[in-house]
Image: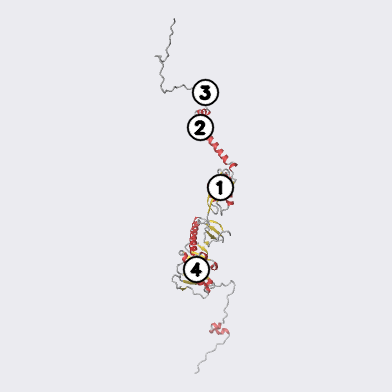
């Protein structure tokens, strides 16, 4: 009988199978795909880009950025973003038509998507009555404008005789219309020049005017005043109203309410005299001393005649009369000759009058 020989496994001479480790993980050889078979498209592109030089990568990035920018410009300039509606909120006195025209003109150049909202807001704030303008987009084809209007505080009477509203910042807003509420009195003495200096001066004038308005309203004096001249805030002058409209009260630089009240008391006292209708001004700019000026035509008035009132608190009054105007002789008119006879004015020249002068008799010896 032939004996069978069982060969031993190579690598394990003992013929004993190795024990399997507890918790061990059997490693399997990875499957090698032939020439990228089974890879995704993204993996292929990444592997391809990895072989390209850096300059080519930069070129591709620039081309892609340019295409995106061109697409953005084309999209923003498309008819889809052209302005078709303008929504305005908060307008009471501002012209809605002017605001809509300005917004439409500016946005039509760029489209709603690329409109410069800050620039549009600045342009709107230059319009009369507009203090603050907030502009926003309403995509795809609208613009919304929210306004905060300026508040009219005083009415200025210009040199041309126009009555124009102004606000606290001395901004001219617009002319008065018949529907506007009549102010207590008007402001005169406006600097109509352009420039920062004139604007600052006008701001001070408006502030002084509003202070006077509050003081005189509280004291019940506003109804006696027609307008206040603040061309020089250190020499305030008030033009009276009603039957006293031709009278100016000069108040100086302080104690405006007290001085105005004293001037009205002096005026009312003089109104009872025949010369009352000739009063031209009452000057209290120096304090307690009140100077009453008269127009031409007042007669029998002594210059600088002072009279004290029984009340010591009453200001002293000095009456000043305007000198009568000298009548000028028209050119070419001969000077009027004296109609008196020479003999009447000079008796020694009686021979020129044809009269015989008596002779003196000689004494007899």
Whether residue 57 can be seen here = yes
Colour setting: secondary structure
Is disc 3 placed on a helix, strand or loop? helix
Q: Earlier in the sequence, mark 4 or mark 3?
A: 3
* Vertical order, 97 against 182 (above or below): above
Q: Earlier in the sequence, mark 4 or mark 2?
A: 2
Is disc 4 placed on a helix, strand or loop? helix
Q: Where is residue 239 in the image (x, y as percent from the top left)?
A: 52, 65
* Vertical order, 147 against 258 (above or below): above
* Disc 1 from disc 3: Cα separation: 62 Å
Tag nearer the camera, 4 or 3: 4
Tag nearer the camera, 2 or 3: 3
Q: Do the residues labelled 1 and 3 touch (CB within 8 Å)?
A: no
Label 4: few (<14), some (14–19) or many (≥20) C-alpha neighbours in 10 Å: some
Question: What residue would you read off at disc 4?
Answer: 264
| Label drawn at residue 144 | 1
Question: What residue would you read off at disc 2?
Answer: 57
Is disc 2 placed on a helix, strand or loop? helix
Q: Where is residue 335 in the image (x, y as percent from the top left)?
A: 57, 75
Q: Are marks 2 and 1 in contact (CB under 8 Å)?
A: no
Q: Earlier in the sequence, mark 2 or mark 3?
A: 3
* Disc 4 from disc 1: Cα separation: 55 Å
Q: Position of residue 209 (x, y in %)?
A: 49, 61
Q: Are marks 4 and 2 in contact (CB under 8 Å)?
A: no
Q: Which of marks 1 and 3 is nearer the N terminus?
A: 3
Q: Is residue 265 left or right of residue 85?
A: left
């Amino acid at each position: 009988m032939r004996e069978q020989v069982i060969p031993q496994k190579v690598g394990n001479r003992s013929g004993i199978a190795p024990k399997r480790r507890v918790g061990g993980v059997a490693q399997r050889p990875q499957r090698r795909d032939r020439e990228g078979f089974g890879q995704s498209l993204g993996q292929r592109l990444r592997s391809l880009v990895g072989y390209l030089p850096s300059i080519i990568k930069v070129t591709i990035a620039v081309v892609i950025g340019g295409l995106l920018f061109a697409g953005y410009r084309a999209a923003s300039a498309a008819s889809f973003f052209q302005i078709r509606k303008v929504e305005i909120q908060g307008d009471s006195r501002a012209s809605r038509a002017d605001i809509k025209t300005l917004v439409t003109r500016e946005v039509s150049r760029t489209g709603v998507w690329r409109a410069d909202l800050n620039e549009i807001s600045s342009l709107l704030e230059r319009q009369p009555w507009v203090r603050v303008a907030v502009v926003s987009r309403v995509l795809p084809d609208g613009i919304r404008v929210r306004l905060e209007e300026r508040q009219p505080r005083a009415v200025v009477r210009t040199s041309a005789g126009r009555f124009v509203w102004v606000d606290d910042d001395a901004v001219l807003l617009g002319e008065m219309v018949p529907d506007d509420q009549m102010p207590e009195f008007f402001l005169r003495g406006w600097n109509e020049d352009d420039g920062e200096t004139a604007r600052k001066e006008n701001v001070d004038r408006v502030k002084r005017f509003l202070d006077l308005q509050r003081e005189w309203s509280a004291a019940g004096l506003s109804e006696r005043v027609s307008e206040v001249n603040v061309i020089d805030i250190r020499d305030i002058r008030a033009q009276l109203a009603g039957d006293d409209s031709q009278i100016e009260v000069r108040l100086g630089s302080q104690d405006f309410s007290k001085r105005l009240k004293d001037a009205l008391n002096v005026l009312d006292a003089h109104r009872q005299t025949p010369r009352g209708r000739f009063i031209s001004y009452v000057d209290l700019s120096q304090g307690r001393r009140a100077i009453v000026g008269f127009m031409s035509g007042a007669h029998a008035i002594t210059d600088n005649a002072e009279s004290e009132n029984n009340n010591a608190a009453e200001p002293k009054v000095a009456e000043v009369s305007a000198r009568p105007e000298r009548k000028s002789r028209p050119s070419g008119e001969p000077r009027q000759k004296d109609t008196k006879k020479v003999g009447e004015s000079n008796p020694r020249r009686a021979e020129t009058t044809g009269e015989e002068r008596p002779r003196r008799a000689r004494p007899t010896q």
